[in-house]
Amino acid sequence: YTEYAGACTEGACAGGKGGLIGNGGNGFNGGAGGAAGWFGNGGKGGNAVTLGVAGGNGGRGGLFFGSGGDGGTGAAATGMMTSGGAGGRGGMAGTMIMLGSLGLPTSFFGNGGSGGAGGDAVMGTAGAGGSGGMAGVIGNGGTGANGGKIVGMGGGTGGRGGNGGMAGWLIGAGGDGGNGGDVVEGMGGGKGGAGGNGAMGMVLFTSGGRGGNGGGWVGGNHGNITGGAGGNGGPSAPFLGGAAGDGGGGGNGFRAGLGGRRGRGDVADGQGPPD
């Protein structure tokens, strides 16, 4: 499959794999993006179009050079107590070689793909945002996506923000966490989604990602809404590292969410750790 909607007549369709030099194809209706060959970018995961279905994961970048594909967005749910679809994960740059418990990326250069946003829900639980993909030896981790919102007045739980993807081993930045989903009206109560965690820096010259903000209430009446906790920031590299990521702010509400920790264990904005 190579992005032509007419070729995908039923269900999710995955994107095709690239050749030795070439990009992977994009998915359709929640299908995964295709992997690249040796050199090229992974395909984008397909955005879900069927109610409540998860978005497709992004395809892997080239083994030696290239970025991972972005994840597809989850579809919204329209039923009263049904869940929104989760966003797809961002693809990693290259793949991993395992040396005991240690994983080494094969890609010399490439960024991780960003996650796809979670789908909204009327009540129930909104979809979680997809996590960002891991970078190659040099590159930035993918950004975690925002969780879906609760859009009905009866309340519910906002989707969790996706975690950021890990930075490159030598140069780069960890991906930022996505924001938790808000509760738009919520007269019947509810809870904002937690923010995703920022990713850590790796070995050298890499910085940590910022934690996502917790979701809160949006609208004229906050009801009995609890704000979501902010995500933790990622620590910087242990050797010649950059800055550690800040923790995300807690969501507002009748009971505000707690802020996330800064990457080195410091607490952002004088607030406590998330619950």
Image (cartoon, rainbow, N blue to C red):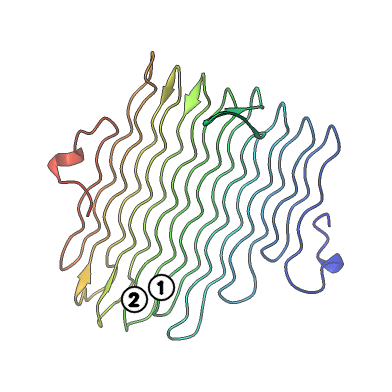
Q: Which quadrant of the rendered structure holds the C terminus?
A: bottom left
Residue 266 % position (x, y): 20, 33
Q: Is residue 163 above or below residue 223?
A: above
In the figure, is residue 114 to the left or right of 256? Answer: right
Mark 1 Cα-neighbour bin, 10 Å: few <14, some 14–19, many ≥20: many
Q: What residue is rendered at 43% in x and 86% in y? A: 80
Q: Farthest residue toward the left?
A: 270
In the figure, is residue 243 to the left or right of 251? Answer: right
Q: Farthest residue toward the bottom?
A: 80
Say which quarter of the image contains residue 68: top right
Q: What residue is rendered at 61% in x and 39% in y? A: 92
94 or 141, which is in the foreground?
94
Q: What residue is rendered at 29% in x and 36% in y? A: 246
Q: Which residue is mark 2?
A: 156
Image disc number at residue 101:
none
Q: Secondary structure at mark 2?
A: loop
Amino acid type at circle 2 is: Gly
Q: Which quadrant of the rendered structure holds the N terminus?
A: bottom right
Q: Is residue 260 above or below residue 76?
A: above
Mark 2 Cα-neighbour bin, 10 Å: few <14, some 14–19, many ≥20: many
Q: Which residue is mark 1?
A: 125
Amino acid type at circle 1 is: Thr
Residue 3 % position (x, y): 80, 57
Q: Is residue 33 above or below residue 182?
A: above
Disc 1 vs disc 2: Cβ atoms closer than 8 Å?
yes
Q: Distance from label 1 to label 2 (Cα)?
A: 6 Å
181 or 267, which is in the foreground?
267
Q: Is residue 118 above or below residue 141?
A: below
Residue 157 % position (x, y): 34, 71
Say which quarter of the image contains residue 247: top left
In the figure, is residue 31 to the left or right of 117? Answer: right
In the figure, is residue 251 to the left or right of 145? Answer: left
